Image (tube, rainbow, N blue to C red):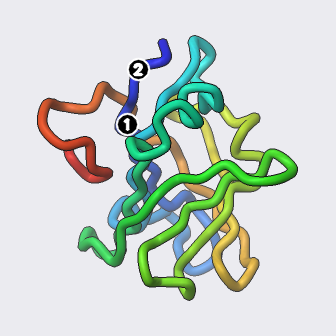
Amino acid sequence: MNDFQHIRLALAREPGHPNGDPGNGWDIVAPLDAGGRLDLRACRAEPERCHVRRFVDGETVATGRLHHGVGDRWRLDLDGRDDLDARGFRLGEERFVVGEYVSILSADDSAHTYVVERVGPVAGGPERAGAS
């Protein structure tokens, strides 16, 4: 695949959210390989195209970048919002396929599970997370 994709993650069922919460989640713009996994080589080739958007109650809270770091760790780095930065738990191994689950650790190290709600090519114009 290797094309940049818009990935929508919605909060899955967890304590306090017995039915999940589609208004709480992440939008990620990143390249995926043929298996639906993050394509590290493509991310490194064009890091400026890897975006994230955190939303709560359907509203944008912050935007930033997806970064790959040491030890195969992926960071969701929100501009000016260290309190909201997050990191993927085994994000490099996860498949971004509709219906699959992905775990993300928030800045306070609490783990939350998100369901892949949508995956599709980035529409024309600027590649910004949240562009549907």
Label 2 element class: loop
Query: Given the image, on which type of amino acid does mark 2 rest?
Result: Asp
Residue 13: x and y in percent read 58, 61
Task: Please say if 1 is above or below 48.
Answer: above
Task: Please say if 29 is above or below 114.
Answer: above
Front position in the image: 10 or 71:
71
Residue at point 53%, 80% (across, down): 84
Task: Classify residue 106 by image quadrant.
Answer: bottom right
Front position in the image: 127 or 114:
127
**Can you tell which mark lies on residue 118?**
1
Q: Residues within 10 Å of mark 1 (few under 14, many from 20)?
A: some
Sequence-wise first label, 2 or 1? 2
- The reply, left or right, for residue 116 in relation to residue 100 is left
Residue 101: x and y in percent read 63, 44
Front position in the image: 13 or 39:
39
Q: Which residue is identified by label 2?
A: 3
Which circle, 2 or 1, is nearer the viewer? 2
Query: Given the image, on which type of amino acid does mark 1 rest?
Result: Arg
Task: Classify residue 80 by image quadrant.
Answer: bottom left
